[in-house]
Image: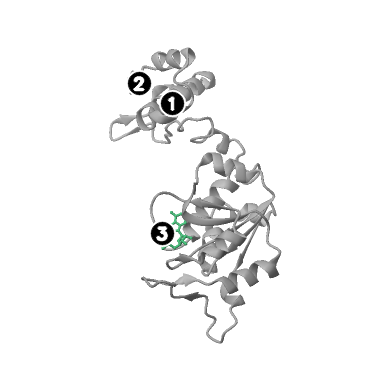
Amino acid sequence: MRIAVISLFQEIIDSYLSKSLLSKARERGIFSVEVHDPRDYATDAHKTVDDSPFGGGPGMVMMCQPVFDLVSECNLPKPVIGLSPGGRRLDHALALELSAMDGFTLLCGRYEGIDQRIIDELVDFEVSAGDYVLAGGELAALALIESTLRLIPGVLGNAKSSMDESFADGLLEYPHYTRPASFKGVTVPEVLLSGNHALIAEWRKAAALYRTLVQRPDMIKARGGLSEADERILAKHGYSYKVSE
Ligand code: SAM
């Protein structure tokens, strides 16, 4: 997968990716990330990439010319995705769609935003990190990159871990415990010490269902409620719950 990022802050992208879990998969050639800086395409002596908004108002706006020139010279992978608070919300389903692609380009805005003509002419669709405003698109781009790449086989050391995780089957993940079995008098669920792997798998499913019921009842609703089998294992492992309306 070839990922290109258009950003005025190359070091933010590079430093995070060099430290993250993904760096090994990058070294193995499973994906590549290249960062292109619009400032390298600015034509004046000051390398200007922003200007004040027409119509007045606070802040600066990223200018057309450096970004248009960058895109026409760099043969970037498609689609071009603009990071924007107004875009499609990044979630597991979107990460899954992106993980099936050969590549894409991420356009990170800064300042008050980007000249709308860049979005209209060069961007295929926009993605948001959530309903809040960041200072720039880099954090959102990194969240998109990491959540997408983790779903590609071979990127994580253990291929099973992304299949087990929250959202993979419409549930939150079950809770984890590690040694010691008793800490300050609080013990781990006994079933985890039993060595009975079938029973442990069943407990994990029940615990995942319960956690999702409590923390994200909307996800239980989205999968059509609880099946009879779900109700059976919840009861068997001692989880009592009330389905909210
Ligand atoms: N003035 C814009 C507004 O009110 O919608 C916010 C501009 S923000 C300070 C600068 C840049 O950060 C945006 O162009 C966008 O690329 C990025 N950004 C901010 N919040 C974001 C979010 N929730 N998701 C994705 N990108 C975001």
Task: Give coordinates of residue 232: x percent, y percent.
Answer: 44, 12
Q: Nearer the viewer, residue 238 or 10?
A: 10
Q: In the displayed structure, does residue 142 sit left or right of residue 32?
A: left
Q: In the displayed structure, does residue 84 sit left or right of residue 162?
A: left
* Label 1 element class: helix
Q: CA distance from mark 3 to mark 2?
A: 36 Å
The residue identified by callout 2 is 243
Q: CA distance from mark 3 to mark 1?
A: 31 Å
- Image point 58% across, 78% down: which residue? 42
Quadrant holding ligand 1? Answer: bottom left
Mark sitting earlier along the chain (3/1): 3
CB within 8 Å, label 2 to label 1: yes
* Label 2 element class: loop
Q: In the displayed structure, does residue 205 sit left or right of residue 79?
A: left
CB within 8 Å, label 3 to label 2: no
* Residue that extends furthest to the bottom in the rendered view of this protein: 45
The quarter holding residue 233 reads top left
Confirm whether residue 157 shows in the render.
Answer: no
Q: Is residue 53 above or below residue 190?
A: below
Task: Give coordinates of residue 245: x percent, y percent.
Answer: 33, 23
- Image point 67% across, 47% down: which residue? 101
- Hey, what amino acid is under mark 1? Ile
The residue identified by callout 3 is 134
Confirm or reject: label 3 Cβ below 8 Å from ligand 1: yes
- Hey, what amino acid is under mark 3? Leu
